[in-house]
């Protein structure tokens, strides 16, 4: 997409206006606020609807956005590394509005009680139908992390989400956590359930033996007579971030050169619009957009960044739009193109929050969800305790929901220290709400959630922390894997995000005493990626945590979140002090 400087500034202005604040609607009723949010005029002749990272959340939920999303080096002060007021300012959104609640952590408890829950496939279905009514031919793209993240998704091997996605009308998708169901199950769904309806695309997944494509690299779909190519970019680090044995016959990677080849090939076949449906993570997408030309837009996922404005990235062929549509079914991205003379002339982008109180539930989707959940309602709804404090996960270093898991793992298993993975999925609970088995599974449901207890040296503790920290704060996005820092219980430490690899973690202490490199410590954890751990016969993490919850006398006191002391990188618009 070739744009002059003037056109670039005009588009940035249009994008900011598209995310305009709703201060005058702040005190209005739900119907009026709904009209303000969802009355989106049609633009152009080609539209894409984008959802990603719903993590199997069929029901409306609460989800607190991060107060810590640090950007370092060239990413400091840039999207997606803005939180709170800084993000609202960049988007031109007023504090206290529905949009502000959807996008930030600000006044979360009060705003959550005011605006209600977000997401839910029945409400998302209504919004999708509404957008399609005003945008005939619009394609619905699913960025992946759809078949994992809930109890029913785990217990049905993703079938609940497959059925829901088909009813929702997904046209094209790519993947990441889908692969943790195993190669056979993934292929079964694509070959049987998706046949003739949903295209699963991934240009960067090949067989380990001969390097043959495992999935279609792209599809070309006509939209109102305009040929549009959708190229898939699956999560490139799947065998590293998740168990290798689950995808033993497949290899992954970023593969810029092959992506460029696919872009050129699609253009050669007549595609007038080329979109990459990505699960790279936004920092990786921004770098990729600078290296690969001929792409009109990258619709991204993985890092759960709800971006109210699009970023425009220059490359040798022009400029590429980069967006990211959040997580947990909270948002639907709407990207409209005006295609003239065989190329994109203009665009509009809007990120629409999905408020359950503002969108009526679609009857057909509601009936499907009821049917899916019926066999499991008793197990899902069992109350294990009530929380007296806010429970949330998302944030670079820790969250109160993860702190609960850490405390439980240490108490039940008699460990001095505990590690919990830096997963970004998981739902939030407000003070006073019930901790049900469903919430616990929302926080822990994977196909390899085994609880572990390991003897680790002080030296190894530092190595683990340094490795994960480099994954999060490496200045080169291509060396980042998109998760947050491993959550740590018991152990205190300081962190310098600006430090060199191997030198970011300092002053490690246990009960105020320095960690000794040669001493051995008892460390609890969960979700090991090794195949040996899967065969060790360990309990599932939710079994351990459930035991702890039931021993709390019905109430869980507010968790004191254990976070590192930061010794570099501050002040930062991606950091808000607790």
Image (spheres, rainbow, N blue to C red):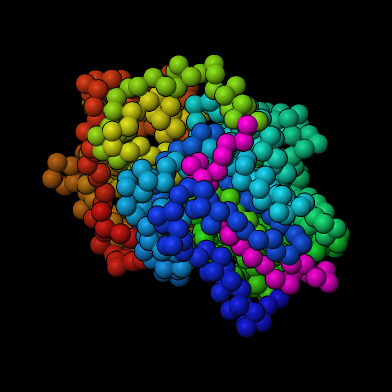
Q: Residue at x 23, y 37 (%)?
A: 558
Q: Position of residue 304 (x, y in %)?
A: 49, 50
Q: Quadrant of the C terminus?
A: bottom left
In the image, is residue 340 part of the stretch drawn in magenta? Answer: yes
- Along the viewing direction, whichever of 112 and 324 lies nearer the viewer: 112
Residue 197 figure quarter: top right
| In the rendered image, the vertical position of residue 368 relative to residue 146, given as above or below | above
| In the rendered image, the vertical position of residue 440 relative to residue 202, given as above or below | above
Q: Is residue 206 visible?
A: no
Q: Quadrant of the N terminus?
A: bottom right
Which contiguous range is marked in magenta? 338-363
- Along the viewing direction, whichever of 511 and 109 lies nearer the viewer: 109
* Left or right, residue 59 beside residue 130: left
In the image, is residue 322 part of the stretch drawn in magenta? Answer: no
Residue 372 figure quarter: top right
| In the rendered image, the vertical position of residue 408 relative to residue 14, given as above or below | above
* Left or right, residue 497 beside residue 425: left
Q: Is residue 343 visible?
A: yes
Q: Position of residue 14 (x, y in %)?
A: 59, 71
């Amino acid at each position: 997409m070739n744009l002059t400087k003037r056109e670039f500034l005009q588009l940035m202005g249009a994008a900011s206006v598209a995310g305009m604040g709703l201060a005058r609607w702040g005190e209005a009723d739900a119907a009026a606020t709904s009209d303000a949010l969802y009355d989106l005029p049609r633009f152009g002749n080609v539209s894409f609807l984008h959802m990603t990272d719903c993590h199997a959340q069929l029901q409306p939920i609460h989800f607190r956005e991060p107060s810590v999303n640090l950007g370092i080096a060239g990413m400091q002060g840039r999207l997606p590394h803005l939180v709170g007021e800084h993000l609202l300012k960049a988007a031109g959104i007023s504090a206290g509005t529905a949009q502000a609640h959807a996008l930030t952590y600000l006044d979360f408890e009060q705003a959550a009680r005011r605006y209600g829950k977000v997401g839910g496939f029945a409400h998302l279905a209504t919004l999708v139908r509404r957008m399609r009514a005003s945008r005939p031919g619009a394609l619905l793209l699913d960025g992946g992390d759809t078949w994992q993240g809930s109890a029913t998704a785990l217990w049905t091997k993703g079938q609940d989400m497959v059925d829901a996605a088909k009813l929702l009308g997904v046209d094209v998708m790519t993947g990441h956590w889908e692969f943790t169901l195993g190669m056979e199950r993934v292929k079964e769904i694509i070959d049987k359930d998706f046949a003739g309806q949903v295209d699963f695309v991934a240009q960067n997944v090949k067989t380990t033996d001969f390097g043959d494509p495992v999935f279609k690299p792209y599809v070309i779909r006509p939209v109102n007579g305009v040929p549009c190519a959708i190229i898939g970019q699956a999560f490139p680090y799947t065998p590293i971030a998740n168990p290798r044995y689950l995808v033993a016959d497949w290899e992954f990677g970023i593969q810029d050169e092959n992506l460029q080849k696919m872009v050129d090939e699609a253009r050669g076949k007549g595609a007038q619009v080329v979109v990459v449906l990505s699960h790279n993570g936004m920092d990786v997408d921004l770098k990729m957009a600078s290296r690969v030309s001929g792409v009109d837009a990258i619709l991204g996922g993985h890092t759960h960044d709800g971006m109210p404005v699009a970023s425009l990235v220059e490359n040798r062929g022009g400029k590429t739009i980069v967006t990211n549509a959040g997580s947990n079914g909270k948002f639907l991205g709407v990207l409209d193109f005006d295609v003239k003379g065989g190329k994109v002339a203009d665009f509009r982008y809007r990120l629409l929050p999905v408020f359950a109180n503002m969108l009526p539930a679609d009857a057909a989707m509601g009936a499907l969800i009821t049917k899916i959940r019926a066999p499991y309602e008793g197990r899902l709804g069992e109350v294990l305790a009530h929380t007296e404090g806010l429970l949330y996960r998302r944030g670079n270093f820790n969250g109160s929901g993860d702190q609960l898991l850490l405390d439980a793992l240490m108490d039940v298993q008699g460990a001095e220290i505990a590690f919990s993975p830096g997963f970004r999925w998981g739902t939030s609970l407000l003070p006073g709400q019930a901790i049900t088995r469903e919430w616990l599974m929302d926080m822990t449901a994977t196909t390899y959630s085994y609880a572990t207890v390991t003897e680790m040296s002080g030296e190894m503790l530092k190595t683990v922390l340094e490795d994960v920290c480099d994954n999060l704060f490496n200045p080169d996005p291509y060396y980042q894997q998109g998760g947050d820092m491993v959550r740590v219980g018991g152990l205190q430490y300081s962190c310098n995000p600006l430090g060199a690899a191997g030198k970011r973690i300092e002053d490690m202490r246990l009960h105020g005493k320095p960690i000794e490199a040669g001493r051995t410590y008892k460390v609890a954890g969960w979700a090991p990626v090794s195949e040996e751990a899967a065969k060790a016969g360990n309990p599932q993490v939710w079994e351990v945590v459930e035991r702890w919850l039931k021993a709390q006398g019905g109430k869980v006191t507010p968790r004191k979140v254990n976070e590192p002391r930061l010794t570099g990188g501050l002040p930062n618009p991606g950091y808000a002090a607790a």
